[in-house]
Amino acid sequence: MIDNGKFQKVLALSDEELRQKITEAAIAAGADKYKVTYALSDVSKLRNMISSLTPEQANALLSSLGPAATAEITKRINEMQ
């Protein structure tokens, strides 16, 4: 689970940091590197989509990715300072 504080930290990242963190987590969770790179080509659009979610919606979306992906992404978010 991602709490509101962690969710806000994700949103506070620069575009490049956000792209890097999402790319690392997605690839570690098993996503195709090239598809992730393409999907993150417009990071400002992604940021707008993420910022429109409540923490509850973000957690529901995260949970829908499956246990392994959810665990990996949550771990990486929790490692953020």
Image (cartoon, helix red, strand yellow):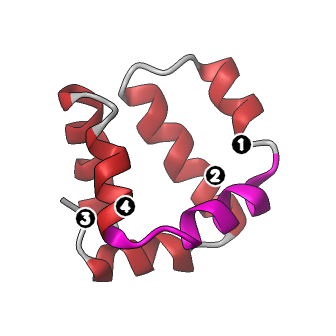
Report the quarter where the C terminus lies.
bottom left
Tell which circle, 2 or 3, labels the residue nearer the N-terminal end.
3
Tell which circle, 3 or 4, labels the residue nearer the N-terminal end.
3
Q: Secondary structure at mark 1?
A: loop
Tell which circle, 1 or 4, labels the residue nearer the N-terminal end.
1
Disc 3 residue type (three-letter): Ile
Given contact means CB atoms under 8 Å apart, are the residues at marks 1 and 3 in contact?
Answer: no
Q: CA distance from mark 3 to mark 4?
A: 10 Å
**Would you say residue 47 sits in the magenta stretch?**
yes
- The residue singled out by tag 2 in the image is 19
Disc 2 residue type (three-letter): Arg
- The residue singled out by tag 1 in the image is 40
State the extent of the magenta-drawn residues as a range.
Answer: 42-55
Tell which circle, 4 or 2, labels the residue nearer the N-terminal end.
2
- The residue singled out by tag 3 in the image is 2
How packed is label 2: few (under 14 Cα within 10 Å), some, or many (20 or more)? many
Q: CA distance from mark 1 to mark 3?
A: 21 Å
Horizontal and vertical percent for residue 64?
31, 36
**Side of 71 where 35 appears, left or right:** right
Q: Is residue 46 above or below residue 39?
A: below
Q: CA distance from mark 1 to mark 4?
A: 20 Å
- The residue singled out by tag 4 in the image is 57
Q: Secondary structure at mark 3?
A: loop
Q: CA distance from mark 1 to mark 2?
A: 6 Å
Residue 79 can be seen in this image: no
Q: Secondary structure at mark 4?
A: helix
Horizontal and vertical percent for residue 67?
18, 30
